Image (spheres, grey):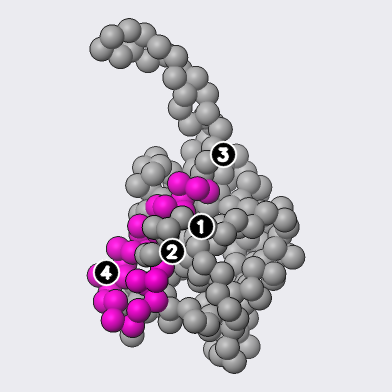
Amino acid sequence: MSVSYMTHPLIKHKITLLRKTATGTNEFRKLIEEIAMLMGYEALADLPTADIEVETPIEKTVQPVINGKKLAVVPILRAGLGMVSGILALVPSAKVGHIGLYRDPETHLPHEYYCKLPEAIDERQIVVVDPMLATGGSAVAAVDFIKARGGKKIKFMSVIAAPEGVSTLMKAHPDIQLYVGCLDRCLNENAYICPGLGDAGDRIFGTL
């Protein structure tokens, strides 16, 4: 099991700003993007490279570039969309898939309504993004869908997580790498993360 909790002070600072009720939609959206980029820098530290020859204004030299199939970023709709631009700022050539899930308000179980992944998904490094990892049900379902379609190398990035969600996801998929911006205290009776930051999708898209 591989779980990495972010310790960088910039990530901590920006997550604190996210939590504030007074943080408006535009600022919230920018913070999510910035946090995703900072977390992506950590999560993509092991991307494979290969040496190529390039010519500088001074001389020819051999230098590394990212090797193999490009990255695939897969947001869980809709809140995960807010993190995509942060990853693309690091790897502009990455392909983007989408997984649509909604949570039943009574059972809290996830239901799929859409799944579209880039071609050759079995050869790509996949980064699934969702700002909130609460019960873990949607995260488990998303990884299930990706594996069913051939995905193998999977990382999962979440800005805020509850211990229950981390446990559920890693028990179901111990082979993935999980990156968490901040581990919060628990879930409440409505399966919201405490202290959390409210509904990330509503705050990103201004649909409160």
Which residue, given by chain and number where applicable, does mark 4 sit on? 27
Q: Is residue 59 left or right of residue 173?
A: left
CA distance separating discs 2 and 4? 16 Å
Amino acid on which disc 1 is placed: Thr
Highlighted magenta segment, given as a residue range? 15-43
In percent of width and height, residue 137 lies at 63, 74
Closer to the observer: label 1 or label 3? 1
Q: Secondary structure at mark 2?
A: helix
Q: Is residue 129 above or below residue 132?
A: above
Closer to the observer: label 2 or label 4? 2
Instruction: Confirm whether the magenta stretch covers residue 19.
Output: yes
CA distance separating discs 2 and 1? 7 Å
Q: Neighbour class for label 1 at 10 Å: few (<14), some, many (≥20)? A: few
Amino acid on which disc 3 is placed: Asp
CA distance separating discs 1 and 4? 22 Å
Amino acid on which disc 2 is placed: Lys
Which residue, given by chain and number where applicable, does mark 3 sit on? 46
**Lower position in the chain sequence, tag 2 or tag 4:** 2
**Lower position in the chain sequence, tag 2 or tag 1:** 1
Is the C-beta separation of discs 2 and 1 under 8 Å? yes
Q: Secondary structure at mark 3?
A: loop
Q: Neighbour class for label 2 at 10 Å: few (<14), some, many (≥20)? A: some
Amino acid on which disc 4 is placed: Glu
Q: Secondary structure at mark 1?
A: loop
Which residue, given by chain and number where applicable, does mark 1 sit on? 7
Which residue, given by chain and number where applicable, does mark 2 sit on? 12
